[in-house]
């Protein structure tokens, strides 16, 4: 089997050109705010029109087109084969932790960060560990530093968290050097069309240390962007290209096409994670990324549901599948309750399970003389069965996905036995796999452990007054 191939589109080539041309007009006529003089000078050196008084950068269309041509040339090996790839989950550090069993929410603690480390070790489709929460029992200026310390000390998987200040950034970079770990900075815009002063300071700090920059604007239609789907996509594209220009100016390298846009629910004034618009945004992101010769990520595979119910499953599956069929290679963070309403350990376990099912489908199935099984079919003949066949024993593990969580029982068996629901199974998994997390031992040697402790001690002396 060649694997699943697809070709899903929501935009015609003419519409892609319209969005692209509209984007160029925005960058040339409106520009974007860059409140950092060093960055402004670098932008000017790369052909931008810079207003130093108002901190505004405008990029002439021919300059942007030249950079896009460089991107396409650099990515000549990029080929659109329409083949689906496996997808994996990641974690977005949340402020709150949600207890599904009691339906309550609280501020996250350092204990949750450690519990998350223990849990993710058992989740094959979550290949790296980001701190599940900002620990409220740690001084705010130290939360990202302490989280990195815990991850480097106790996690067998790579990971990190959002880096919050220029001061903490320098200590985190120092820790990464001790660990020999690659680390970069996620340079986000603040929509519409601006960068934060602190973000630019951190970006420069990383660049001067030879570290890469990533990008991922999050335009919200109806709030920080036009309410129309096309308008949201156009402003999102403008902020992505603005980020590409800035990253190229600072590093002479390119970021990817991270399209994390959403729509606002104007009834609640909450950013929607699960509306059908997320499918539009994901498909459009894949098409625009292909137009520029880049690979795309989108904030799909998410939900507005506050519990792991039918709505949650439907919204996650529909938006992720549409986006990935169109060509996105990455989805939104998992384990989230609703639209960034908090983190749930049980939700992360459930998300790991559906990702496993998705990846089973993507891998496809083998077609050869053995698997076609003509000889077996002839031998069993009419009205026979295949349960006792050696062929069944030989291929059963490759030919069926046995879920650890999803129900495959008959109604009668379920009704007469343990009526354990999906959420209860996920909760039991969490508690079983994390029962000894308070006694975790460092996974690094003692010298590195002590070096990390010393760096954190120095950070506390500077930050905590």
Image (cartoon, helix red, strand yellow):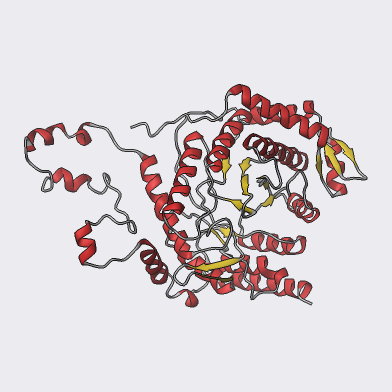
What is the residue that sits farthest to the front in this orientation?
267
Q: Quadrant of residue 254?
A: top right
**What's the residue at 81%, 29% (across, down)?**
60
Quadrant containing the C terminus is bottom right
What is the residue that sits farthest to the right in this orientation?
53
Residue 214 in the figure: left or right of residue 367? right
Q: Is residue 14 above or below residue 150?
A: above
Quadrant containing the N terminus is top left
Please count the marks in the image.
0
Report if residue 444 is visible in the image: no
Q: Quadrant of residue 123?
A: bottom left
**What's the residue at 36%, 61% (across, down)?**
422
Residue 82, image x and y in percent? Answer: 47, 30
Residue 173, image x and y in percent? Answer: 69, 59
Residue 111, image x and y in percent? Answer: 55, 74
Report if residue 94 is visible in the image: yes
**What's the residue at 10%, 43% (across, down)?**
385
Q: Quadrant of residue 450?
A: bottom right
Residue 201, image x and y in percent? Answer: 79, 54
Residue 278 in the figure: left or right of residue 162? left
**What's the residue at 78%, 52% (across, down)?**
196
Q: Nearer the viewer, residue 235 or 93?
A: 235
Q: Is residue 47 above or below residue 96?
A: above
């Amino acid at each position: 089997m060649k694997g699943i191939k697809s070709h899903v589109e929501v935009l015609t080539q003419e519409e892609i050109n319209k969005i692209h041309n509209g984007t160029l007009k925005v960058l040339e006529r409106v520009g974007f705010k860059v409140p950092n003089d060093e960055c402004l000078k670098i932008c000017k050196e790369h052909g931008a029109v810079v207003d130093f008084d108002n901190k505004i950068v405008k990029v002439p269309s021919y300059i942007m087109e030249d950079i896009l041509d460089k991107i396409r040339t650099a990515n000549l090996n990029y080929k659109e084969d329409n083949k689906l790839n496996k997808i994996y989950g990641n974690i977005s550090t949340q402020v709150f932790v949600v207890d599904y069993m009691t339906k309550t929410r609280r501020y996250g603690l350092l204990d949750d960060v450690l519990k998350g480390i223990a849990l993710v070790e058992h989740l094959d489709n979550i290949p790296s560990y980001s701190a599940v929460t900002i620990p409220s029992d740690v001084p705010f200026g130290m939360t990202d530093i302490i989280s990195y310390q815990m991850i480097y000390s106790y996690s067998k998987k790579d990971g990190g968290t959002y880096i919050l200040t220029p001061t903490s950034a320098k200590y985190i970079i120092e820790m990464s050097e001790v660990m020999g770990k690659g680390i970069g900075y996620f340079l986000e815009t603040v929509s519409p069309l601006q960068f934060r002063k602190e973000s630019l300071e951190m970006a420069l700090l990383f660049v001067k240390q030879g570290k890469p920059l990533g990008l991922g604007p999050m335009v919200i239609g109806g709030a920080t962007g036009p309410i129309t789907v096309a308008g949201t996509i156009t402003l999102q594209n403008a902020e992505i290209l603005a980020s590409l220009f800035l990253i190229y100016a600072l590093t002479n390298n390119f970021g990817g096409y991270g399209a994390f846009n959403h729509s606002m629910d104007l009834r609640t004034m909450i950013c929607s994670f699960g509306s059908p618009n997320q499918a539009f945004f994901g498909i459009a992101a894949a098409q625009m990324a292909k137009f520029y010769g880049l690979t795309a990520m989108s904030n799909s595979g998410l939900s507005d549901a506050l519990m792991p119910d039918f709505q949650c499953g439907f919204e996650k599956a529909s938006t992720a599948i549409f986006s990935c069929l169109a060509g996105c290679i990455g989805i939104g963070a998992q384990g989230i309750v609703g639209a960034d309403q908090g983190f749930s350990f049980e939700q992360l376990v459930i998300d790991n399970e559906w990702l496993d099912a998705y990846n089973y489908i993507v891998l496809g199935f083998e077609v050869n003389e053995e698997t076609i099984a003509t000889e077996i079919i002839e031998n069993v003949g009419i009205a026979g069965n295949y349960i006792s066949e050696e062929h069944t024993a030989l291929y059963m593990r490759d030919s069926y996905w046995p879920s650890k969580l999803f129900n495959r029982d008959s109604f009668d068996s379920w009704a007469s036995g343990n009526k354990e629901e999906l959420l209860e199974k996920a909760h039991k998994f969490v508690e079983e796999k994390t029962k000894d997390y308070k006694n975790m031992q460092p996974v690094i040697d003692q010298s590195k452990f002590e070096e990390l402790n010393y760096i954190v001690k120095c950070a506390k002396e500077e930050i905590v007054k």
